[in-house]
Amino acid sequence: CANYVLLVSSPMRRRPGLAGLKAQKARQAKLQTVGRKIEEDNMEHMQKQLSVFRENLEAFAAKHKDKINKNPAFRQKFQILCARTGVDPLASRQGFWAQMLGLGDFYYELAVQLIQLCLALREENGGLISLNDLHKELSRRRGRHQQEASIQDVEQAIEKVQCLGSGFRITQMGGEAMVISVPTELNTDHAAILSLAKSHGQGSGGGYFVTIKMAMAKLKWHRQRIITCLEPMVQDSMVWLCDQEGAGEEEGRQYWFACLAIS
């Protein structure tokens, strides 16, 4: 008997006509319009909220003016609050915040004092000093009669000076915040050498040093890499040389870190 195969053809999909395309385009345009309206409404609402918050912030600043000026910890928290709302009370010496709190003048004065202090100490440390030591020396020189400045205040003042492009900046070296006041580029090798001096090279007088032999043993570096790292620091007076009598260069030549020696 013959085999019959039944072929069932599926109905062809009809392509949307011109009217359908126009309707689809109109729907998309309408959705975009609604989306923009929602976005504009949200933005307007956020701006109103931010405006109210800033007004409350100004009222708070006026009420706690003395505490903001005299208490470094309270001042830091106030600055964090300002940063979250896009307000920078240190941006200018003019305007509401300068008149209300005088913060602009305080940080400009602090920045000038820090620059003068770093210049005065440059002959001793070559322009490299720990943030803690700089803060201690600043506090000692400012005395009790001037407004107290915290480490966070020092960081804020240095941040404002960085725009001058003078190389004045804070960097992390050997797990410690260091202030550099010379246009010298320090890399991870310098940080490793500094960390080695702090952990293994304490001298009898309280300072810190490294030798080529010590760095070769502890860091597993070649001799030339160590010299390449240390020599520029010697030239910039960040590191002092001290040759021990009767010893070779690798073991007898000590590279003393001036920035750690004054700690």
Image (cartoon, rainbow, N blue to C red):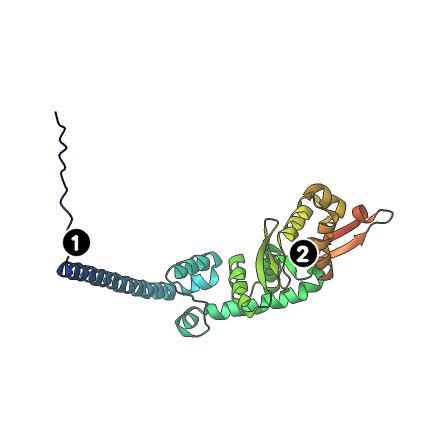
Secondary structure type for disc 1: loop
Residue 98 position, x and y percent, is 43, 71
Q: Nearer the viewer, residue 220 or 209?
A: 220
Asked whether, in this view, residue 184 is left or right of residue 95, the answer is right
Q: Nearer the viewer, residue 190 or 4?
A: 4
Mark 1 neighbour class, 10 Å CA radius: few under 14, some 14 to 19, many 20 or more: few
Identify the residue position indicated by label 2 in the image: 259
Residue 19 position, x and y percent, is 13, 61
| Kind of residue at disc 1 | Arg
Residue 137 in view: yes
**Residue found farthest to the bottom:** 94
Secondary structure type for disc 2: helix
Identify the residue position indicated by label 1 in the image: 15
Mark 2 neighbour class, 10 Å CA radius: few under 14, some 14 to 19, many 20 or more: many
Q: Mark 2 or 1 closer to N-term?
A: 1
**Residue found farthest to the top:** 1
Going 72% across and 41% down the picture, which residue do you hit?
217
Going 53% across and 60% down the picture, which residue do you hit?
155
**Residue found farthest to the right:** 246
**Residue found farthest to the front:** 1
Q: Which of the image's four quarters has the N terminus? A: top left
89, above or below 222, in the image: below
Asked whether, in this view, residue 226 is left or right of residue 174, the answer is right
| Kind of residue at disc 2 | Cys
Going 16% across and 54% down the picture, which residue do you hit?
15
Q: Nearer the viewer, residue 238 or 58?
A: 238
C-alpha gap between disc 2 and disc 1:
79 Å
Going 54% across and 57% down the picture, which residue do you hit?
151
